[in-house]
Amino acid sequence: MEKKTDPKKEAIRLTKLWQQYGPNTYPLDLDELVSGAILTSDFSDNLIIDRQRFDSFEGSLVRTNGTRKWTMLLNSQVRNGRRRRFTFAHELGHFMCHRELRNKFEDSEESLNDFRDEIENEANTFASWLLMPANLIRNEFGSIQWDTEALREIGNRFECSLQASALRYVRLSPKPIAFVVSRDGMILWAVKSETAPYMASYCFGDELPEGSHAVSCHQNGEVGTERQAVGPVWNDLRHAFESQYFDQSGQGYQYTCIEFQ
Ligand SMILES: [Zn+2]
């Protein structure tokens, strides 16, 4: 029977191996995790990491026909190191959780961002839990105020993209906070913590709300990371603090960190 492994449990298991029996250093060294913690534990499958230039994908995982040997192909042409790292962790997620399901996985930028596909979603969850363990985030960033400065610190600490860092941090936080990604004044996606209130502007295609610092920065071309108090613009009743960050990669992303009062 085909069996699938829970990506969260698997990420926690590897995190324990790394933290208790491994070097316990972060940013996590994925190569060392694979060669040390994974391949030397009670494991019948073999995994080789191969970095090359590819045109059609960012990462891939392939079984050698009829064997328990797997090769992970990572595209060295991808320039952003944090993205290469996340792809590595994503492919490792397929290896740890999905290798009984298929003999081949191939990931382009599109599939890496496909939140509707269960398998891709699981590999992303595995990657973010592995690269950004909950215990470290709580210990080191549990009491910070949520703004783009904090977000950059989290990204640097774990060598993850700001989007991946924000997603992980906000979902873990007990405080009423949110993170909004927009472009040209329109929301692409957003995430809020469990204790955050209802937000009228939250979904793909919603406009940034009138009166928000986010919309004024967008309209006036201001580049502000300073934390600013705003009125009840994200929620009808709750005031909030906002700070903005404009991504420099040429994609035109605007990031807004929101902390409700
Ligand atoms: Zn994938």
Image (cartoon, helix red, strand yellow):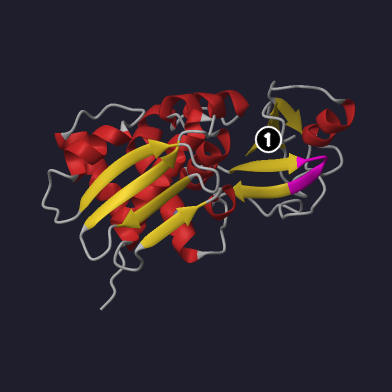
Give how far across and how far down residue 108 sits, in percent. 54, 50
Using residue 182 as the reference point, say whether residue 89 is left or right of it: left
- Which residue is disc 1 drawn over? 255
Residue 40 falls inside the magenta stretch: no
Give the camera-side residue of 189 and 96: 96
Using residue 194 as the reference point, say whether residue 44 is left or right of it: left
Give the camera-side residue of 129 and 198: 129
Residue 185 falls inside the magenta stretch: yes
Quarter that holds the N terminus:
bottom left
Image-quadrant location for residue 104:
bottom left
Image-quadrant location for residue 19:
top left
Give the class, few, some or many, for how many residues have Cα within 10 Å of label 1's Cα (few <14, many ≥20).
many
Give how far across and how far down residue 84 sits, in percent. 46, 36
Image-quadrant location for residue 243:
top right
**Which amino acid type is shown beneath numbered disc 1?**
Tyr
Give how far across and how far down residue 47 sits, in percent. 25, 48
Question: Does the rendering let one see residue 132?
Answer: no
Q: Secondary structure at mark 1?
A: strand
Please say if 222 is above or below 252: above
Give how far across and how far down residue 30 sits, in percent. 31, 36
| Magenta-colored span | 183-187
Please say if 172 is above or below 245: below
Using residue 75 as the reference point, say whether residue 231 is left or right of it: right
